[in-house]
Image (spheres, helix red, strand yellow):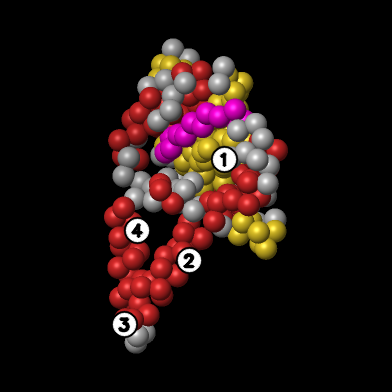
Amino acid sequence: MANYTVADIQALRERTGAGMLDVKKALDEADGDIDKAVDILRVKGLKGVTKREGRSASEGLVATHIADAASGQVGTLIELNSETDFVAKNEKFVALADEVLKAVVDAGAADLDAALEAPLNGKTVKDVIDENAGVLGEKIVLRRVARVEAPVVAEYLHKTNKDLPAQVGVLVGADAKAGEVARDVAMHIAAYSPAYLTRDEVPADVVENERRVAEETSRNEGKPEAALPKIVEGRMNGFYKENVLPEQAFAKDPKTTVGKVVEATGGEVVAFARFRVGA
């Protein structure tokens, strides 16, 4: 039997995030040499990438970066997923997220395809993620990337579990005047998850479907035919108040709206992005 201890098993698990059985097998094969065991786990893991492709990766973290630019500031938001929260809080996974974020920022990638092809350590981001998936023994996925450019960009990261990395991330782009409330708006977005910046951004088919549902619901409730247009309009306004950022009740003061808070600065919010891990 290979010469290794329980402490060696735990150390290798913490170093790689691999499962107990995989760690023991690797240490047996490496005759207790931890560095060799890491290499064994990497090789076996890379061979298993295809097998892992069909598995679900719904844990993980979000990370942000804001940099000054000629136009003001540029914010980048990524979501990196793992299969389990055990790996999500692993130091190697967190370090991978930092490397991936830096590569995405350096490449100026604004979408997922460009991010996966961004150079990293002489390879692509996708290749490095696959290599780390081999070591960690889980499916690792760069799921989403967002880029926000504005005179001022604010960020907010929220932990849904104190033992895990941030799982909700928000970027808010604003002009200089609205920049003073941009972080408060980002915190609001984290909590209230608006889908759109303005009513005009709501797709026509979504509006049409909501209107149809509102009308059918009203009829099924036996509302008078003559009153339907007004009732439907009221329900549509309710839909907008729930989903359009400026129309939502402000998290810090529900007596007012996000729109009024921003309007009071004399400025405007021009863009936002929100990711919640696995959602």
Name the residue: 30% across, 75% down. 216
Label 2 crowd bin: few (<14), some (14–19), many (20+), radius 10 Å: few
Tell me which numbered mark, 1 or 4, is placed earlier along the sequence: 4
Give how far apart the Cα atoms at labels 1 and 2 are: 22 Å
* Residue at image point 40% right, 30% down: 111
Q: Residue at x 46, y 18 (%)?
A: 107
The span picked out in magenta is: 142-153
Residue 152 is a magenta residue? yes
* Nearer the camera: disc 3 or disc 4: 3
Closer-to-camera residue (229/126): 229
Question: Element under label 3?
Answer: helix
How crowded is the residue under tag 3: few (<14 C-alpha within 10 Å), some, or many (20+)? few
Residue 208 is tagged as none
Helix, strand or loop at mark 1: strand
Observer able to see residue 137: no
Q: Which residue is disc 3 drawn over?
A: 225
Q: Is residue 137 left or right of residue 67?
A: left
Residue drawn 33% across and 81% down?
A: 226
In the picture of the structure, the residue carrying the numbered disc 2 is 238
Residue linked to disc 1 = 269
Which numbered disc flags the more N-terminal residue, 3 or 2?
3
Q: CA distance from mark 4 to mark 2?
A: 12 Å
In primary-sequence order, the first of circles 3 and 4 is 4
Amino acid identity at mark 1:
Val
Give the answer, above or below, for where 59 lies relative to 221. Answer: above
- Give neighbour class at mark 4: few <14, some 14-19, many 20+ (Cα, 10 Å): some
Establish if 28 lies above or below 59: above
Residue in front for this viewpoint, 219 or 120: 219
Q: Nearer the viewer, residue 133 or 43?
A: 133
Which residue position holds label 4?
207
Label 2 secondary element: helix
